[in-house]
């Protein structure tokens, strides 16, 4: 029996035998593919190359650097690292905690000291796996039996998660006979993962995949001392409350303890903001910190952070006045474009810098200034009578993605500025080898918010997200270590709260668009979380900025 497939890579329709795998098809057209594929999108859904076709399909093979490729590459590299740890350090638990410094921070629980010599041995083992070209073998079995396999292997967090989501069957992989699970496709074999590095870092080490700017070499670490501290503070908090992974979060929900977790997480936010407020107030009394610049990437919660910080400053007897840099966007038809021709809203020059600096100069001189308001639906600035004047005891809070960029306020003396960096540094793990990406958390926030308040579909938000990320890499992340304080806006419970609404919006993405692949992946990701009733969230919560129901005005 023959079936028809259409391959987007070669823009051609042809027949193959029913039951052919994607690897079979790739081999049959290898001379026409300009790369060796690592995975494939089938009807705009990412699949491993061992996926078999029995009906007509639209297929698009993916290279390791494009589309779904980087995620498949990183997952496969993580499984190779786990195999290396089981071989060289039997009984030691590998934990891959989060992304930092262009890599992934790894710790070895039950091992005293991670030395350079040990890291070198692990790296040598990874290179040996590449040379041996071992397959990542996919299996599907009853969940109860998979849980038993994982528990025998010491992968307790994986078994705990599977027991809470209660699927009848579960997919897992083996590499060189060692079982593990990853929540998405893996590469065909280890030879597809040739570029990586391991480097000692703090108490553990960094796992570094290829450099996106030059895939022939590993990514190069950068100094992120403040970011590392912000992460580790929250990791420790997670351990104290007993919610370090999604299985533990789901257990809280099953035992009707979500409200307890919400209360303690919100209290942690309040404590952090109070500490930042006290530091600002101390500098203000010493003659500095007349301007507080609050920056962070898209959907990090800058606006609510600014409003809540203002309340804390008021309790310190200061009079905060607020400006949003978003209101200084140039009209949409004057917005600069990026290399792909898209509007580059992340560019510093998407702001009317001349008008902003003129207004800021007048405000600091004690003049009353009418501030603009940006109409996102119409794509232009409007003046609605919103005025500002600084008086005795006043402090100016300026919120926006470019707040930490020195060029924005280059004419203001450094002593007069205090910088706060806000980011949703998600420290919750899916399990020991799968983390919750900070970018996914922010993307889900943005999808919900833009759908609710900006008239933007999930399809459009997903389509624009790569451009947003490129802009962040260029315009925001290079300045994050300039911050005087970092505020982690993530909340341990938030993905459970966002689950139902995000899934509803994501289901609106049509099957016949490329963005469906990302929408499907996010829906699959959310399926691991048990839902949490949003009615439990206080009206002052940062999450209300995205879900609605906030007591703050936006």
Image (cartoon, rainbow, N blue to C red):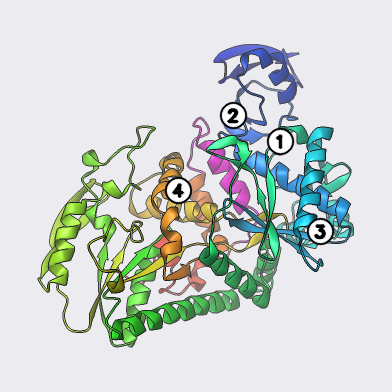
> What residue is disc 3 on?
155
- Label 4 SS: helix
Mark sitting earlier along the chain (2/3): 2
Mark in the foreground, 4 or 2:
4
> What residue is disc 1 on?
194
Viewport quadrant of the N terminus:
top right
Viewport quadrant of the C terminus:
bottom left
* Residue at 58%, 72% in the rendered image: 233
Mark 1 to mark 4: distance in Å? Answer: 25 Å
Mark sitting earlier along the chain (4/3): 3
The answer to whether mark 2 and mark 3 are in CB contact below 8 A is no
Tell me if residue 151 comes above or below residue 338 in the rendering: below
**Is 349 on the left-hand or right-hand side of 43?**
left
Mark 4 to mark 2: distance in Å? Answer: 31 Å
* Residue at 45%, 48% in the rendered image: 473
> What residue is disc 2 on?
43
On residue 473, which mark appears?
A: 4
Tell me if residue 248 comes above or below residue 143 in the rendering: below
- Label 3 SS: loop
Mark 2 to mark 3: distance in Å? Answer: 34 Å
Q: Range of the magenta residues?
A: 507-530
- Label 1 SS: loop
**Is 331 on the left-hand or right-hand side of 81?**
left
Q: Position of residue 361 (x, y in %)?
A: 15, 65
Mark sitting earlier along the chain (2/1): 2
* Residue at 26%, 75% in the rendered image: 290
Mark 4 to mark 3: distance in Å? Answer: 35 Å
* Residue at 59%, 13% in the rendered image: 13
């Amino acid at each position: 029996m023959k079936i028809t497939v259409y391959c987007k890579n070669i823009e051609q329709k042809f027949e193959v035998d029913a039951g052919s795998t994607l690897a079979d098809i790739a081999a049959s057209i290898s001379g026409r593919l300009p790369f060796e594929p690592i995975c494939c999108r089938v009807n705009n859904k990412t699949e491993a190359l061992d996926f078999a076709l029995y009906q007509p399909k639209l297929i698009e093979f993916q290279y390791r650097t494009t589309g779904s490729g980087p995620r498949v590459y990183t997952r496969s590299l993580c499984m190779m690292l786990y195999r290396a740890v089981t071989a060289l350090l039997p009984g030691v638990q590998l934990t891959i905690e989060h992304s930092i410094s262009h890599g992934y921070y790894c710790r070895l629980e039950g091992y005293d000291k991670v030395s350079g010599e040990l890291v070198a041995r692990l790296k040598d083992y990874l290179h040996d796996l590449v040379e041996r070209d071992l397959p990542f073998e996919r299996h599907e079995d009853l969940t109860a039996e998979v849980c038993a396999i994982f528990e025998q292997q010491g992968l307790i967090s994986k078994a705990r998660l599977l027991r809470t989501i209660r699927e009848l069957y579960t997919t897992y992989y083996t590499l060189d006979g060692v079982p593990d699970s990853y929540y998405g496709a893996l590469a065909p074999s280890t030879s597809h993962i040739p570029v990586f590095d391991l480097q000692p870092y703090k108490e553990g080490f960094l796992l570094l995949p290829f450099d996106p700017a030059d895939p022939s070499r590993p990514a190069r670490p950068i100094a992120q001392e403040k970011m590392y501290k912000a992460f580790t503070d929250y990791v420790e908090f997670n351990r104290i409350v007993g919610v370090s992974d999604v299985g533990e979060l789901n257990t809280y929900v099953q035992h009707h303890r979500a409200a307890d977790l919400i209360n303690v997480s919100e209290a942690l936010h309040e404590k952090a903001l109070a500490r930042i407020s006290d530091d600002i107030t101390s500098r203000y009394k010493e003659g500095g910190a007349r301007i507080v610049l609050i920056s962070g990437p898209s959907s990090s919660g800058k606006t609510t952070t600014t409003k809540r910080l203002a309340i804390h400053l008021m309790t310190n007897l200061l009079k905060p006045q607020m400006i949003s840099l978003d209101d200084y966007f140039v009209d949409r038809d004057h917005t600069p474009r990026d290399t792909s021709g898209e509007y580059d809203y992340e560019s510093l020059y998407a702001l009317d810098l001349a008008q902003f600096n003129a207004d800021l100069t007048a405000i600091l001189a004690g003049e009353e200034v009418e501030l603009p308001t940006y109409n996102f639906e119409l794509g232009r600035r409007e003046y609605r009578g919103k005025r500002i004047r600084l008086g005795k005891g006043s402090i100016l809070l300026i919120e926006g993605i470019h707040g930490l960029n020195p060029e924005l306020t280059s004419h203001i003396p450094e002593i007069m500025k205090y910088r706060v960096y806000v980011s949703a540094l998600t420290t919750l793990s899916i399990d020991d080898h799968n983390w919750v990406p900070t970018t996914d958390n922010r993307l889900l926030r943005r999808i919900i918010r833009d759908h609710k308040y900006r008239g933007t579909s999930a399809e459009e938000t997903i389509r624009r997200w790569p451009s947003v990320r490129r802009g962040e890499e260029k315009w925001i992340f290079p300045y994050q270590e300039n911050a005087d304080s970092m505020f982690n806006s993530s909340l341990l419970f938030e993905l459970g709260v966002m689950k139902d609404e995000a899934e509803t919006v994501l289901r609106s993405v049509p099957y016949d668009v490329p963005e469906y692949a990302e929408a499907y992946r996010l829906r699959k990701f959310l399926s691991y979380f048990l839902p949490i009733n949003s009615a439990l969230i206080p009206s002052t919560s940062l999450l209300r900025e995205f879900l609605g129901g906030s007591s703050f005005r936006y």
